[in-house]
Amino acid sequence: MRKFLGIDYGTKRIGLATNIASLVEPLCVVDNKTDKSNLIVSKYALSAIAKICQEKAIEQIIVGLSEGLMAEKTKLFAKLLAAKTNLPVTMIDETLSSYEVAHKLKEAHFSLKKRQEPIDHYSAAVILENFLESLPT
């Protein structure tokens, strides 16, 4: 199976997940502290994601797409990422991924402190799982 990188884009943090065959693994959360010259993605975040793509031999990037103004920012982020990595970027609906993760963590009896930590990488895993499930078998 091909190697994918799932991304939950945010203006403050970017969650990443990857796959091993059909098994999805939350990878990490990358800080996205932008400056006035670029309000979409920091140079650090873009470089960190590109490096992970190289190290993990990623063949395609899957970015979760939300709604409204955030959707427009996400589309621009996806274009910048495609240019930086020279990899195909596919966008899929991620409307309730963060809610789904928060619900799963609560069901699994994670402590309130643990549930308040960044969950962006878990959201990226849900996005990637949804994408993999949509692929023809």
Image: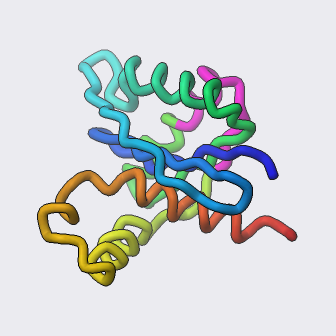
Indicate the quadrant where residue 68 lies.
bottom left
Q: Residue at x 61, y 26 (%)?
A: 55
Left or right: residue 62 versus residue 14 is: right
Indicate the quadrant where residue 31 lies.
top left
For the stretch drawn in magenta, the main secondary structure is helix
Q: What range of the chain is rendered magenta?
A: 78-90
Q: Nearer the viewer, residue 111 or 51?
A: 111
Q: Residue at x 41, y 42 (%)?
A: 28
Left or right: residue 136 versus residue 45 is: right
Residue 80 lies, in percent from the top left, at 55, 27
Answer whether residue 87 is magenta in the image. Answer: yes
Quadrant where the C terminus is found in the figure: bottom right
Q: Residue at x 49, y 35 (%)?
A: 77
Residue 9 lies, in percent from the top left, at 42, 45
Above or below 95: residue 119:
above
Q: Nearer the viewer, residue 35 or 106?
A: 106
Residue 66 lies, in percent from the top left, at 45, 59
Above or below 63: residue 130:
below
Indicate the quadrant where residue 82 lies.
top right
Answer whether residue 88 is magenta in the image. Answer: yes
Q: Residue at x 55, y 22 (%)?
A: 51
